[in-house]
Amino acid sequence: MAYERSDRTGADDGADTALALKILVAGGFGVGKTTLVGSVSEIRPLRTEERLSRAGELVDDTGGVDRKTTTTVAMDFGRITIRAGLSLYLFGTPGQDRFWFLWDELAQGALGAVVLADTRRLEDCFPAVDYFEHRKIPFVVAVNCFEGARSYGAQEVSRALDLDTGTPVLLCDARDRDSGKEVLIRVVEYAGRMHTARLLDTVG
Amino acid sequence: MTSQWYDAEAGPLVRPYAMTGGRTKPGPSNVRFDLIALVVVDDDPPGRAEEDLLGPEHRALLSLCRAETQSVAELAADADLPVGVVRVLLGDLLEAGFVRVSRPVPPAQLPDERILREVIDGLRAL
Ligand SMILES: Nc1nc2c(ncn2[C@@H]2O[C@H](COP(=O)(O)OP(=O)(O)OP(=O)(O)O)[C@@H](O)[C@H]2O)c(=O)[nH]1
Ligand SMILES: [Mg+2]
């Protein structure tokens, strides 16, 4: 891996081979993003202090708002150490649309994403689905099975969301570690398949 | 008194950025570190005297880096500082030669299949 270095001479040591991979966890408000990140990793809150004017550029005109203030955007952040020099980082994206501008940064270089869905309000995950489809970031849809929600089959959800064929849909329980692990495994597998397919596309 | 707290570029002083002297962007190198960019201590760092001149936040970050190679996001979480502030402080440390920061992986350059296989096996074994 290439390193920025003040004197630009470059250097080779063990740390240069360290690899960090990133998976995003997105979905509507209260769908279980924090729960999922917490069930598979040691979760830590990450504060990004954004100047309101910057956020305001992309949303409505903040006219009367004092431009000197900042707003704190909190997101979930977890690390899973696969081995020394190979880590998987999870980022739970902020649920509010107001902070779309943060997604672009998060999405850069992401291996893949999980879109969490709640069948009682499936439409809440439309923005996330659109977002990842447009940027060609491989994602799986994980239906978080809340009690009291009628259970739908993966097929039904796939059709309701009008997903591209091949986009995996699976049912999960965000509170359950094994279930969360399975979701991540599916993302990595799918990302690998998509990547290979794209490589083949460019060759032939 | 006030003028030394911020430069013209940075505009009005924003409280969380007080410890960066009001700067909200990293210095001349002008790199915006990715959240998962990895920070390692430089193997040929400046001397003790220069380190003593660093502020407490710079030093706190440096000691976190010394303990372990960490991502920008982890440093922010551990130091309990907003990411924007950590980026500026890291920019200073980079410029002064205390640390090195990995460049973000270009989006098209996914790790090879062997690595992904390792990740999957690692997840199963969790
Ligand atoms: N029954 C059930 N409850 C869940 C499940 N997952 C999460 N919850 C609960 O749903 C609530 C919201 O979960 P969070 O993980 O905070 O959701 P979130 O997506 O992070 O919410 P925001 O960050 O506010 O958008 C919490 O009270 C969880 O305990 C699940 O699989 N089943
Ligand atoms: Mg949450």
Image (cartoon, rainbow, N blue to C red):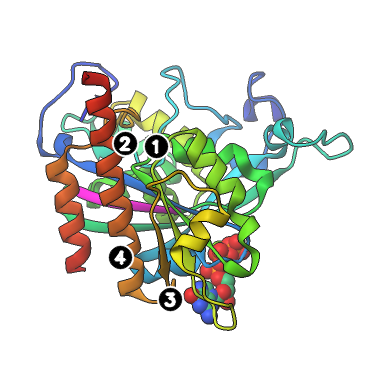
Residue farthest bottom in this picture: A148
Secondary structure category for the residue under label 4: helix
Between the C-alphas of marks 3 and 2, the distance is 45 Å
The residue shown at (64%, 25%) is B10
- For label 3, the residue is A175
Badge 4: few (under 14), some or many (20 or more) residues near its Cα, within 10 Å?
some
Task: Tell me residue A78's x, y (percent).
Answer: 38, 58
Question: Would residue B57 appear left or right of B119 to someone viewing this image?
Answer: right
Q: Earlier in the sequence, mark 4 or mark 3?
A: 3
- Are discs 2 and 1 located on one and the same chain? yes
Q: Chain of mark 3?
A: A
Asked which quadrant contains residue B1, the reply is top right
Asked which quadrant contains residue A119, the reply is bottom right
Identified by mark 2, the residue type is Glu
Quadrant of picture, ligand 1: bottom right
Task: Tell me residue A121's x, y (percent).
Answer: 65, 64
